[in-house]
Image (spheres, rainbow, N blue to C red):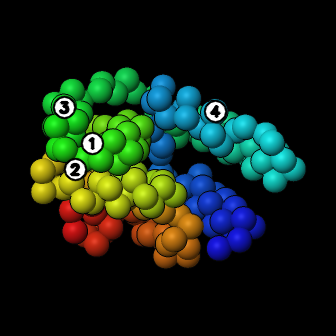
């Protein structure tokens, strides 16, 4: 998929989140990740993306759709994952995105992420970590219009998108 089609899919998805009655959890860790990854400007495309995201976040905040709860680290889940005997690279990748799972578990059990690698790693550990089985992992690029329609229909849990399916 080209960079342009990736940007378009993400922009359409986020615009639908803003338009429909959805809210976004923005923990301190998620906000820090957005600032580090999504808002860094290294090219003209990054500048366009960053401008859109800043405007989108401002609009979400103005509409009261940015929730900023304190989400505690789940020491039990983290300990369990650290003791699964995973390859170091796999364990590290999961650990870096576990804050998304922790936030989802305290809210609506939905993660929106383009990281298909971590998605696959998480799916592979659901037998050992049943608490994450019902978390829906949604990649707006991979789902395209289906993801936008899912938002329009209320973003209900889709079994095949759950980590444990």
Q: Which residue is mark 4?
A: 35
Q: Which residue is mark 3?
A: 79
Image disc number at residue 113: none
The one nearer the camera, 104 or 153, is 104
Instruction: Give the alpha-carbon distance from disc 2 to disc 3, as whole Å.
Output: 14 Å
Q: Are marks 3 and 1 in contact (CB under 8 Å)?
A: no
Q: Could you tell me which secondary element the residue under label 4 belongs to? A: helix
Q: Is residue 133 left or right of residue 155?
A: left
Q: Quadrant of residue 88?
A: top left
Q: Quadrant of the C terminus?
A: bottom left
Cα separation, mark 4 vs mark 2, equals: 26 Å
Q: Label 4 to label 1, Cα distance in Å? A: 23 Å
Q: Residue at x 55, y 76 (%)?
A: 145
Name the disc covering residue 132, or none. 2
Q: Earlier in the sequence, mark 3 or mark 1?
A: 3
Tell whether label 2 touches label 1 (CB within 8 Å). Answer: yes
Q: Position of residue 30 (x, y in %)?
A: 49, 34
3 relative position to 111: left or right: right
């Amino acid at each position: 998929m080209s960079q342009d089609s990736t940007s378009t899919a993400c922009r359409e998805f986020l615009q639908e989140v803003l338009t429909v009655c959805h809210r976004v959890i923005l923990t301190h860790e998620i906000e820090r990740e957005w600032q580090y990854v999504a808002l860094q400007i290294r090219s003209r495309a990054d500048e366009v993306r960053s401008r859109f995201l800043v405007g989108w976040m401002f609009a979400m905040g103005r509409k009261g759709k940015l929730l900023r709860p304190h989400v505690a680290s789940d020491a039990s889940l983290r300990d369990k994952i650290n003791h699964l005997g995973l390859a170091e690279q796999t364990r590290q990748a999961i650990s870096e995105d576990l804050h998304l799972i922790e936030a989802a578990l305290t809210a609506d059990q939905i993660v929106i992420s383009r990281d298909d690698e971590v998605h696959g790693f998480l799916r592979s550990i659901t037998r050992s970590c049943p608490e994450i089985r019902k978390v829906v992992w949604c990649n707006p690029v991979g789902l395209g219009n289906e993801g936008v329609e899912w938002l329009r229909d209320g973003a209900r849990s889709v079994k095949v998108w759950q980590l444990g399916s």
